Amino acid sequence: MDPSCKQCSFAMKRRHIGLQQLQAITSTAHAFLGPNKRLKFIQDEDAGDAVLIGSCPRLLEHLELDGSVGQLLHETVLAQKKLFHSGTNTLMFLAGAWSRVALECLNRGISVSDIKSAMRGGLQECLDACTQLAVSVEEFKKSDVRSNDQCIDMMVKHSRYINARTKNTQSDDNVQDFRKLSIKSDDQCMDMTHKHSRYANTQTEHAQSDDNVQDFKGSGIKSNDQCMDMTLKHSRYINTKTEHAQSNVNMQDFRKLDDKSDDQCKHMTLKHSRHFNARTKNTQSDVNVQDLKGSDIKSIDQCMDMTLKHSTHFNAQTEHNMQDFRKLDDKSDDQCMYMTLKHSRHFNAQTEHTQSEVTMQDFTKSDIKLDNQSMHMTLKHSRHFNAQTEHTHHDVTVIAQAVSHGCSSMHLLLKAYELQNRAHLDIHNLATCCIPGVSEDHACVLRGYVTLLSVQQTTQVQRLQGRPLNIALINGDLSEKYRHVGFNRPGNIKHITDLFITEESWIENAYKLLHDSSIDVVFVSGVVDVDLKQRCKDVLILEGVKSSVLKHFSTCTGAVPVSYICQLDERRVGRGLRLRKESISGRSDIVSITTDCSVLVTAVICSSVSAKLQMLEDEFWSCAHRLQHALTDGKLLHGAGVTELICIRRLRQYTQLHPDRSPHDSAVLELMSEAWMDFISTVMLNSGSVANRTEAWTSITHQMRRHTDIGVTDGLGVYDNVTVKCEAWRRALDLVFLVLQSDTEIITGVSQGENTYNQLMFL
Amino acid sequence: MSRISKKKPALCTDEPLSNSTICQKITLLRNILSTAYGPTGRLKQIHNNVGGHVLTTSTSTALLKRLEMSEPLLKLISTALQHHTTRYSDSGLFMGIFTLTLIENTKKYGLRTSTAIKVYKHLVEQCNVYLKGDSCGCKVPVEFSSCDSLVALAHSMITSKPACMLDSRETQQISSLITQAFLYSIPCNSSGTACFGRTVTIGIEGQSVNHSSVFPGLLLDVPEMLLPGDLERLGDGPFKVVLFGVSLSGDISEVGDVALEVHRGLNPERDLLQQLLKIGEQVVKDKVSLFACQKVVHPVLQHYLREHEVVVIERLGLALMEPFAKITGARAVASLFSLVPMEAYGLVAGLCFQDCGSKKLLQLLSSKHAAISTMVLCHRNETMLEELKVCAMTCQRAEHVLRLTLREPYALLGGGCTETQLATHITHMNQSTAPTTAAALGISHSEFLMAVESFRSSLLAVALSLEHDGQDCLIDLTYGHRWVMDISSQTEVKHTCGCGLLEDRSNLEKTHLNTACQTFSPVFLENNDTQPKVLDSFSAKLNALNVAVEMASLVLDVKYIIKDVN
């Protein structure tokens, strides 16, 4: 039969099969979005085994996708994974959501080129929003609380560009409204003042803020915190003297507060911190401390005093801080705990984190120690503040927490980072070792390269422990049959008479070589001849060692990786290796291999369910890469759907701003924002914050109308990587465009006689 | 007793063009090609259904390379087309669509093949005369004093390949890069026979497009074992270079698939390795600093060389052999059993690392001012490795087109305007002279007119193939340019014509393309201030037109297809 091509047609007028396929395949990945992934079992009917899947690349790996669209998707996801090790779930979801957008557009009779230009414009708008919204890691670690507010500010700023002048005049009206404010108008007030302070000149600002203050003075307790908001914000833009004056007024207001003031006070300082940057952090905890105390007026006064001083003299503030802390003499454990938690929330640190632990202990022990600790913290922070470029340990912890997305692996990663004891997370000197049959709690991080041993190896290790050892590194397999890549084995060699070299003699030679060079440990990247392993009783030979580990030990020990064992000589042997038997939950068949200058650490991942190991390992690596991206990007995006929510808003504004654009544009952009809605609602649904999609949509619409974001309620402190996210979006859209523009699938090498394909034309 | 298996008789197809299956296949191929035509052309996804790589493309070169035809007639056309694109790099789809439509139209109009062939040949001659003549309205001279038209040529090449997925800014950048690379390749102040330099195109995936750039010299992937310190240790150039064209992996695959009988005590592998090390010794003795090999270098030899501070580059690949030899002046050594002759060594002026986005590359600088530059193309989308290749291929092509332009410093109007003008001109010219020409060709008047009509509508069919979103195509009745309805309004015509030379005026009368209208001679536009925005290669299109007519005539002339099925 002739080899022939057959072709089938994708684009049937308004029903694009390719896009439908893309949508169908990607829908399987919806459950992987968000922090609570719902795992999947994939069963292979032929082989009879099943695998547990928790991520898109693994899913696609196990699905047999023979269509071109499926393969394109797989390639796209793999490429994203290869480069970023993250963002694949987003990519896959959006590829599906946007192919639905494209389908709907086709359905409405919009031409392909119109869809392309509109969607590209829409994505660009969203990417621009991301660039503007990205929180610098420096900023972010100082005050995570303000994150959401900042989004709002950004949005406000944006809308201001639309019509700055009218806004300016309107602000007066707003002030009027503001006087009759209830709690609901809080957000509006915020916006107003912001705009106002930007555009109104200093004089009016003074006047107005005075007015406001006057009004609020009489407006009762409820409005007090709003008053604070406003005045403090004003103080950012006017000179120091006025600031003092205003603050005095504020203090006056505060003096009128009764025991309800806890919240307001807290609120105030939070807002405050937003404008005075990190320094006020310490103040926050003070306020909390005061709250715990039960907050009498005096303490609030002190707190206020302190804050003011703080804003002018940092050192003085620190002392005040300490003094405040000293007043916390006989605190009960609970209260201290509460404080620490509050505290750590503002620092975004974890309770497991060493510093926090110490702090907690100190809190429970005595107030003096606590003072020292707090002193220490403050100093640390002041250092951050001065030398912003350097990520300290604490900062990394804060960032790690933000990008952990609820992965328990992040603790493990942080421990690894601690153990590495470097300024940056060194992902190249990180290895993993999976241990089945041990419960997940035993996961830990050990110095050096950790691996599981066979019974024979266990006894070898026992013998080799405790003295410096020699090492050889082998690239490829360690067997007689192995040849380097690119070596073409002659197919047809016949040896006359006996073989000149037998396997036995090769093994003898290899053994002799190892023995003569007094090698104790051999790392092999490939597999090792079974007989050789048997023969070398006193040499520990480890197979399947990753090339990064080989490279590490090459630099640490001076060993040169070789392809053939015959290349080994004195100069290629590494020295100074040490073995240590480790024991984890009763399993003692574990070894850690280190050198004196080794910075390699291994995360030991345990699970009593061995099917989960692969997933936990994937999760660990994705955490590691997320953290690394965060540190290299130096920027983060708000997670938990906040960024996407802003994208929706931007898209809607864009349509309003450019009414002159083609009528199709607004339709396409509206559909695109629906795709974002879909994304957010799926995240919400998966995270369990809503019961169903309708509820999610209602909630999103509600959030859209108000100026707060959903992140405030359930996404506090969740952040995403900027580059990874933007790149995933771009790649998803590229994929959708490729499929959208395709009208024909051509399958080659199929004979005409095969009847498995109907409706196909042969060429 | 031996058994004789009877040979099967040959299969013969009589009048292949009246066979409906064959006609269907011709239509199918024409459909595939015409839907892929132009900047909004639809992409084709080609794969082998067993998990092979998916190729997404709309270029004729990539498409036809992968398509296997079952019909000899289609194979014939496909081969001719591929030959054309190898020589001219452009207008492949134009040629394919025109050939196939001519064949279909001849059938549709019920023309006798001999008549049709005669008339088509006559017409294509007229086209040649018109296009080469001075009064041709569809060509513009390419100004080498400014690079605007060069950039425009490159730009239309790039935009006609939608699989590159470049936005307008990126397209602009890549077009100017191509022009830049082209200008680099023109040798300056050379005496005697000047010859073009070379541009090597390499692709980097995952980087954003705006990291693309052109570098002098040759850029290579950094060898895995090469560390920055190694280059520092080398010091300043020039460095002696040796280049091997044979595999140095130490295998004996070169002997081919034959049975070898090896006697006791012999170990071919060991002996070969000894031989390789001898080469190594010689090279080190001759103070070579850069050791390059097209294929794999045995790890033992690599170790030896590295220990003697020789930089080893292996797996250079066939494509880079020629530019490598050119830039270093080294002659590729083809044997490992003789000493490397002294004259085979080459020189590089310097070796350094070059950053391209986040990727590091090794740069070789020429010692002899060889006009070799490397265009590094980056594409954000790593997945579409193939797409990138299409992009790289397109770029090499575009540069080729620019070189052809040096020979014939003209460009044709793009955007379908050349086709409409040519069709209008041909029809008009033959309207008045029809009786005499028909008599001269020895055919009837009506047959002649019918054949002209078939030729005309085939040309217009190409112009019509540029639209894929269902817009209406128009032709103006003064200049014969092609116009498209604006999609959003449906009643208004886009501001400029297909090639961008003309702006719409209220008094410009237009009619739908492919409807019969009164013939007219397109007005020759002189002293026009505006420059056309879309340009096509002159030589490529001229050749495509001629080959298409020739191929169509050949296919129309086929009476029998005889297939040996044994």
Image: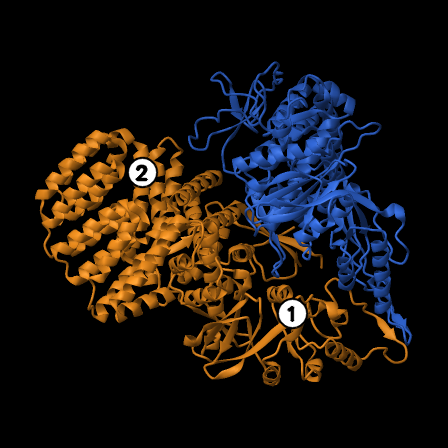
**Marking on residue B71:** none
Can you identify the residue that label 2 sits on? Answer: A157
- Residue B394: name its quadrant: top right
Which shade is chain A? orange
Question: Which chain is home to disc 2?
Answer: A
Provide the secondary structure element on which disc 2 rests. helix
Instruction: Tell me if residue A293 comes above or below residue B473 in the rendering.
Output: below
Residue at coordinates 52% horizontally, 74% vertically from top-left?
Answer: A45
Instruction: Tell me if residue A35 comes above or below residue A245 in the rendering.
Output: below
Is residue B103 in view?
no
Chain with blue colouring:
B
Question: Which chain is home to disc 1?
Answer: A
Can you identify the residue that label 1 sits on? Answer: A525
Q: Position of residue B343 (x, y in %)?
A: 88, 45
The residues bearing labels 2 and 1 have C-alpha atoms spaced at a distance of: 56 Å
Front residue (pair B93, A303): A303
Front residue (pair A701, A313): A313
Left or right of A449? Residue A499 is: right
